[in-house]
Image: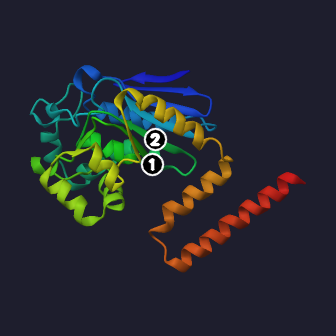
C-alpha cells in the first residue's frame, strides 16, 4: 500500500515493513528541501504497527547529494536560494537547517529499526541519509563520500554523530576533511556497512534481514534498541542500572501476559 509519492520520495507499507524509496534516478536522487519535507512527512505517517523501515533508492546511485542549484542565486524552483538563506539572521538560518535535519532524525526512533540499502554513489547529503539509518546493507559498488568540507561547508544533516560513533574521531575527521571515497571493502571492514553483497543481491539481503528483525517480540527489540542507543552517554554503572530497569519491565510484562 502506497501512502506517499511526491517530490522524489515514495512510502509504501507491507505489514510490519515500510519502504521509503528515493524515486528520482534520472538525477541520481539528488536532494532538495522539498525532498527533505517529503522524508519528514513519511516519518510522521508511518503506521504504528510498522517495525522495520527500509530506505532504498531507484537507479544506479543511492543519492548524489544536494542539488547544486540550491547554491545558485536563482536557487531551486519554489525554494529559498541558499545564497539568500546565508544573508538571513542567525536565528533564521538555524531554524531553517533544523527543519532540514528533521528528515534525517526520525529513522532512529526506538520503536523502529531502519535499514538503508545503499548502492552506487552516496555523497554528501546522500552519505548522511545512509548514516541516518540504524543499519546499512551495501552493494559492492557503493561509494561513500562526505564532500561538504571540500565545498567550504560542514556536514550539517545529523551525520557527524553517527559517523564518529561508527568509525571513531580520527577516521571520521580524515574522511570528512579529505572528501575521499570510501568503497565497499573499507566500509565493511570499518563497520560503516553492516553487510556488503553483490548489487544484484541487495534487495534480497535487505528482505532477509527485515524478516530476521521481525522474529523477536517487538517490546524486547524496542527496549534493547533504547539500551544500546543510550549506552555511550551513560557510565558503566548507569548502563547496568538501565539494563536492570529494562529487564524489570520485560519480566513484568511477560509474567502479566502469562496470567
Q: Is residue 258 visible?
A: yes
Left or right side of 60 for 52: right
Q: How many marks?
A: 2
In which quadrant will I find the N terminus? Answer: top right
Residue 55 locus on image (x, y percent): 42, 35
Q: 190 above or below 217?
A: below
Q: Nearer the viewer, residue 75 or 182?
A: 182
Q: Is residue 252 above or below residue 192?
A: below
Mark 1: few/some/many CA within 10 Å (<14, 14-19, 20+): some
Q: Residues within 10 Å of mark 2 (few under 14, many from 20)?
A: many
Residue designated by label 2: 115
Nearest to N terminus: mark 2 or mark 1: 2
Residues at marks 2 and 1, CA–CA distance in whole angstroms: 6 Å
Q: Which residue is mark 1?
A: 134
Mark 2: which secondary structure? strand
Q: Are marks 2 and 1 in contact (CB under 8 Å)?
A: yes
Q: Quadrant of residue 174?
A: bottom left
Q: Which residue is more in the foreground, 12 or 197?
A: 197
**Camera sees residue 157:** no
- In the image, residue 151 sits, relative to residue 167, either above or below, namely above
Secondary structure beneath disc 1?
loop
Amino acid at each position: 500500500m502506497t501512502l506517499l509519492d511526491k517530490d522524489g520520495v515514495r512510502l509504501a507499507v507491507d505489514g510490519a515493513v515500510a519502504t521509503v524509496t528515493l524515486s528520482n534516478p534520472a538525477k541520481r536522487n539528488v536532494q532538495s528541501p522539498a525532498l527533505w519535507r517529503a522524508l519528514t512527512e513519511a516519518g510522521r505517517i508511518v503506521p504504528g504497527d510498522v517495525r522495520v523501515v527500509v530506505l532504498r533508492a531507484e537507479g544506479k546511485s543511492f543519492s548524489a547529494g544536494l542539488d547544486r542549484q540550491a547554491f545558485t542565486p536563482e536557487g531551486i524552483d519554489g525554494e529559498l536560494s541558499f545564497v539568500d538563506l546565508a544573508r538571513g539572521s542567525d536565528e533564521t538560518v538555524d531554524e531553517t537547517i533544523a527543519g532540514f535535519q528533521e528528515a534525517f532524525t526520525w529513522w532512529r526512533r526506538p520503536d523502529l529499526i531502519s535499514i538503508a540499502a545503499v548502492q552506487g554513489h552516496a555523497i554528501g547529503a546522500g552519505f548522511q541519509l545512509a548514516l541516518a539509518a540504524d543499519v546499512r546493507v551495501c552493494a559492492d559498488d557503493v561509494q561513500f563520500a562526505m564532500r561538504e568540507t571540500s565545498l567550504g561547508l560542514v556536514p550539517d544533516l545529523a551525520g557527524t554523530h553517527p559517523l564518529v560513533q561508527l568509525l571513531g574521531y580520527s577516521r571520521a575527521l580524515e574522511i570528512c576533511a579529505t572528501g575521499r571515497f570510501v568503497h565497499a571493502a573499507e566500509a565493511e571492514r570499518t563497520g560503516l556497512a553492516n553487510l556488503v553483497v553483490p548489487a544484484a543481491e541487495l534487495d534480497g539481503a535487505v528482505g532477509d534481514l527485515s524478516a530476521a528483525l521481525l522474529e523477536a517480540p517487538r517490546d524486547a527489540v524496542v527496549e534493547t534498541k533504547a539500551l544500546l542507543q543510550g549506552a555511550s552517554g551513560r557510565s558503566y554503572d548507569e548502563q547496568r542500572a538501565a539494563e536492570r530497569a529494562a529487564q524489570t519491565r520485560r519480566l513484568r510484562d511477560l509474567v502479566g501476559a502469562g496470567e
